[in-house]
Amino acid sequence: MTPNSETSRGENLASCHDCGFVVALEGGAHHAATHCPRCHAVVHRRKPDSLNRTWALVITAAMLYVPANIFPVMRVISMGKAQEDTILSGAIYLLVHGMWPLALIVFFASVVVPLLKLIALTFLLISIQKGSSWRPVERTKLYHVVEAVGRWSMTDIYVVTILVALVSLGNLATIEAGLGAVYFAGVVVMTMLAAESFDPRLIWDRVRESNG
């Protein structure tokens, strides 16, 4: 029995990314691929170029994160006067006016969560590239948390979209989406794609390699 025979990789098996069906792969190359007999999607042993793709998406998200927090996400025009709010100033406004639960939700979902996701994905990428075998279970759980919370970072975008659609009273009051909302949507999309392109099985590949 070979060292890898007790794993799906050792048995030349892989799970379909679309439907979860376990498929016998063709060939012995690391990125050998075949088609799922159930849904006909392409099945890979490991996601092709997972690390490079994830790095590119994480770096892009990090670049978008700065203007997303500098430029206003919303512009309110009321009685001829315009007021622009960034994510942070909007949270402060809610806090000052006694709406601290909503302020905390906006701050946590729109400022803290995207930043933590970037830090977590960067940590996972570096740990794999350095061949770390440190706490693979915890790192795998960290990845699943990052993947699960991704969509909740869109809270600000949902709020702005709803307000833009509902508040359009001509000269009395109008709400417009700001440039920051575009950058912020880009951050959320890029981090979601980064989590999707990351292959957590690489964590365990490094553990197996370090154990010989």
Image (cartoon, helix red, strand yellow):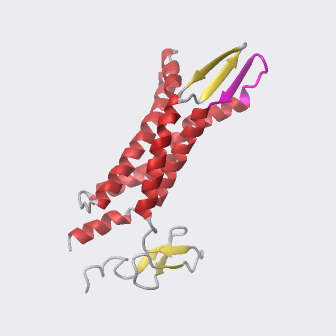
Q: Is residue 119 magenta?
A: no
Q: Residue at the spot x=44%, y=57% of the render?
A: 54
Q: Quadrant of residue 141?
A: bottom left
Q: Is residue 14 left or right of residue 161?
A: left
The answer to whether any part of residue 52 appears in the image is yes
Q: Is residue 116 left or right of residue 68?
A: left
Question: Residue 24: horizontal and vertical position, in percent?
Answer: 46, 82
For the N terminus, the quadrant is bottom left
Q: How many marks?
A: 0
Q: Quadrant of residue 119?
A: top left
Q: Quadrant of residue 139?
A: bottom left
Question: Residue 41: horizontal and vertical position, in percent?
Answer: 57, 73
Q: Residue at the spot x=48%, y=19% of the render?
A: 95
Q: Is residue 56 left or right of residue 134?
A: right
The range drawn in magenta is 166-178
| 154 vs 26: above or below | above
Q: Looking at the image, which is closer to me, 18 or 61?
A: 61
Q: Looking at the image, which is closer to me, 144 or 177?
A: 177
For the C terminus, the quadrant is bottom left
Question: Residue 167: horizontal and vertical position, in percent?
Answer: 72, 25
Question: Residue 43: horizontal and vertical position, in percent?
Answer: 51, 74
The answer to whether any part of residue 198 appears in the image is no
Q: Residue furthest right?
A: 170
Q: Residue at the spot x=45%, y=43% of the render?
A: 62
Q: Residue at the spot x=72%, y=19% of the render?
A: 173
